[in-house]
Amino acid sequence: MRKSLSGTRIREQRRQARLTQKSLAEQAGISPSYLNLIEHNRRAVAGKVLLSIARVLDVPVSSLADGVDSAKISDLYEAAAHHPTIGAEVAGVEELAGRFPGWAQMIAALYRQTRDQEAMITALSDRLTHDPFLAESLHGMLSNITAIRSTSNILTNIDDIEPEKQARFHTIIHEESRRLTDSAQSLVQYFDKKADPKTGIATPQEELDAFLEHHNYGFPQLDNLGEAPASNVEIAYIVNRIMAEGVSVENQETSRLITAFLQQYARDAQAMPQSDFTKAARRCQYNPSQLAHIFGTSLHAVFRRLAFQDPAQTAAPPMGLAISNAAGRALSRRPIADFAFPRHGNACPLWPLYQSFATPHVPTLTLLELPGQHKFIGLAIAEAQSSPRFGAPPELNAAMLILHHEQRALLAKWLPDLGEARPIGITCRICPRQSCTARTEPQILGEDIPVQTISGQ
């Protein structure tokens, strides 16, 4: 388990405040020897003691408490592995994040920027090679240029052209020039659809994630639709209003993804009205199978309704969600603390999310363990998205609901014995499990990084 770094932060803040250990201890109401143990991370600190120390140092409690962003630490590991010749001290990454969070954030941000730019370059290279729109546009531009050159050559080399034909050739040059200009403008607009340099967002999926995060993954305007049935026109009006009031979206594909998500959210809200669903969820201890039976809906719909609840409003335990199609493309996701999703590349193939495709419509429940001994409960099922038809394979999507293992007490009545935890990772690139037979790509961390220091991405 990763050691606490609260003591390190307290020591740094005390030094910046030019206080001795004795002075800080007296003002905080603890002994100097106890403070010494805290500062050397030999004693945990929380509650009233942490509040007293933060008050004396005149800093927010959050700046001293544990909770260093695991994504930031993961980015620092990746940055060190991306530049192996520099010889960064990878064993001190968490110490760096704890003592100098500003510097750590800047290094992580610079690395993410570089990584995103490389991803954009790769995407543009693929676009140049395989994009049918680009190929068609270039072919059209070449046709326009050829027509202009051919017509200009006639006008230049033939002197006795009849006025009527000459006017027609001029018209051809004008029309082909206009088409050439339109094609060039279309290409410029096409290539302008790239990552926002301020946010680092590179794909429509990431824009969708940013939109959902901006709204805290909940939409009160849609939550109570089932209590007062609304027509499709009314739902469309609400969806358009949410999009107009949210983050500005210019990418057409992103707009399509957001609209599809909100329409699905509205259908779930109609099938499971907020107040009824909240009461039923508490009554059956958040058992997805029982909720699906109560409301006559699918497990996927229940997963979505549970994951996109606001724990502050419903007192429900926080839950993460990942939905994927059979090709492994993420369709919808909500992260949960210490279980982030990879921003680029594939996730761990050992996730029940992917393994559920082998047994469609069979729900699975698994105890999962990430490197760093973080344990989670994973509920997964693959469901067909359309009615079965002879001669046509079913279109399957898989969903995985993720809960912290510490929430097990809330689910005790229906949760069976989970047995031993299944070791998984976030993505092979940063997974330190050397003997994993499911690895699809080499890890980029050094072999000397112990498993317990990796707590997620």
Image (cartoon, grey):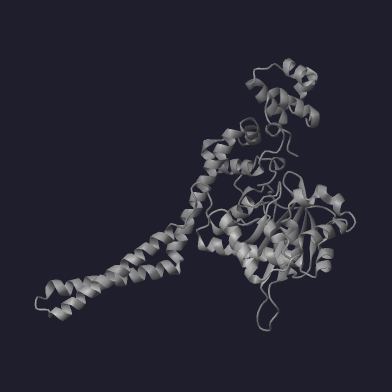
x and y percent of residue 318 in the render? 76, 50
Residue at horizontal 41%, vertical 66%? 134
Residue nearer the viewer, 442 or 426: 426
Q: Is residue 170 left or right of residue 206?
A: left
x and y percent of residue 279 in the render? 84, 58
Placement of the N terminus among the 4 image quadrants: top right
x and y percent of residue 159 in the render? 9, 75
Residue 441 appears in the picture as rendered = no
Q: Is residue 364 left or right of residue 326?
A: right
Residue at horizontal 61%, vertical 58%? 242
Residue nearer the viewer, 456 or 442: 456
Q: From this view, report whether residue 359 is shown above or below residue 415.
A: below
Residue 281 appears in the picture as rendered = yes
Which residue in the rendered view is the most extreme toward the left?
160
Residue nearer the viewer, 263 or 84: 263
Give the image quarter of residue 328: bottom right
x and y percent of residue 375 in the render? 77, 48
Which residue in the rendered view is the most extreme toward the right?
413
Residue at horizontal 68%, vertical 58%? 221
Q: From this view, report whether residue 394 is shown above or below residue 58.
A: below
Give the image quarter of residue 352: bottom right
